[in-house]
Image (cartoon, helix red, strand yellow):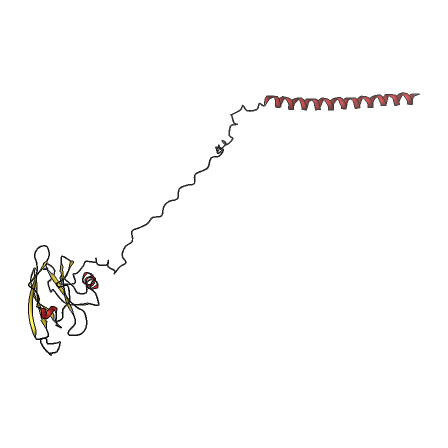
């Protein structure tokens, strides 16, 4: 009987302990949960359009409008320089340049060579005015030869202010020589063959003609004899 009573008492004590643990555990759980809920209730979400202190400001990017294109950055144009002549080179002489070193007219100049090229056939420049720069005459000349023989045809070319004026006669004639010149005049001797003498020593003539500049053109002072213009008749 005593044993039964003791056993019942032990069971009662054990039941009380179990109940206390359960209540205490449950109360603790309830307390923790209540505290978490309270903390959550005191934290408010930031209002729209505001940010928390210390947070970096968001970078705003504008979205392109529908159908819009982004213009490319303009390219920098290349820097160019005007071309310059290489050291030691010179610009080409103008087409009407007839002067040369130390003389008013140079047979090898561009202007004289262009005048020769305008004649029919093959011509080379020979005797020319000897005027020097600073004292150039109004009428300058070049004696042009159309061959290598002593009886080769000859033209007298006239120039003024660097310009080619033309020839003394429309046709070239052999044995023609310039015998004098001045500021505005050039004197020419025309010879011809009188018999069977060699071409190097014509005995006919001379017929002396003076060509002068009258202010607007070259004037031929006189006419040539038929022995010059028609040597084979």
On screen, 138 above or below 204? above
Residue 229 position by quadrant? bottom left
Q: Nearer the viewer, residue 43 or 192?
A: 192
Furthest toward the front, the residue is: 233
Q: Position of residue 182 (x, y in %)?
A: 6, 62
Furthest toward the right, the residue is: 1
Q: Position of residue 76 (x, y in %)?
A: 37, 44
On screen, 153 above or below 26? below
Q: Nearer the viewer, residue 6 or 180?
A: 180
The structure residue drawn at horizontal position 87% and vertical position 21%, both measured from the top left corner, is: 8
Q: Position of residue 18 (x, y in %)?
A: 79, 24
Q: Position of residue 145 (x, y in %)?
A: 17, 69
The structure residue drawn at horizontal position 10% and vertical position 69%, both measured from the top left corner, is: 228
Q: Nearer the viewer, residue 229 or 209?
A: 229
> Is residue 23 shown left or right of residue 54?
right
Task: Specify the quadrant that holds the N terminus.
Answer: top right
Residue 132 position by quadrant? bottom left
Task: Specify the quadrant that holds the C terminus.
Answer: bottom left
The structure residue drawn at horizontal position 75% and vertical position 21%, both measured from the top left corner, is: 23
Total number of numbered discs in the rendering? 0
């Amino acid at each position: 009987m005593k044993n039964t009573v003791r056993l019942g008492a032990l069971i009662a004590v054990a039941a009380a302990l179990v109940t206390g643990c359960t209540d205490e555990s449950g109360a603790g759980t309830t307390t923790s949960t209540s505290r978490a809920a309270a903390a959550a209730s005191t934290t408010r979400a930031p209002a729209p359009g505001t940010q928390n202190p210390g947070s970096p400001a968001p970078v705003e990017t504008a979205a392109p409008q529908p159908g819009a294109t982004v213009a490319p950055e303009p390219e920098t144009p290349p820097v160019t320089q005007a071309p310059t002549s290489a050291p030691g080179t010179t610009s080409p002489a103008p087409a009407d340049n007839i002067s040369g070193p130390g003389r008013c007219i140079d047979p090898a100049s561009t202007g004289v060579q262009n005048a020769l090229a305008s004649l029919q056939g093959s011509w080379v420049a020979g005797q020319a005015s000897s005027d020097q720069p600073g004292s150039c005459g109004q009428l300058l000349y070049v004696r042009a030869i159309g061959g290598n023989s002593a009886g080769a045809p000859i033209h007298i070319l006239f120039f003024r202010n660097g310009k080619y004026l033309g020839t003394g006669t429309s046709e070239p004639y052999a044995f023609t020589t310039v015998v004098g010149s001045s500021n505005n005049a050039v004197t020419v001797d025309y010879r011809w063959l009188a018999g069977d003498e060699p071409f190097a020593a014509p005995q006919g003539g001379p017929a002396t003609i003076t060509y002068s500049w009258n202010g607007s053109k070259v004037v031929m002072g006189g006419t040539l004899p038929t022995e010059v213009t028609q040597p084979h008749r």
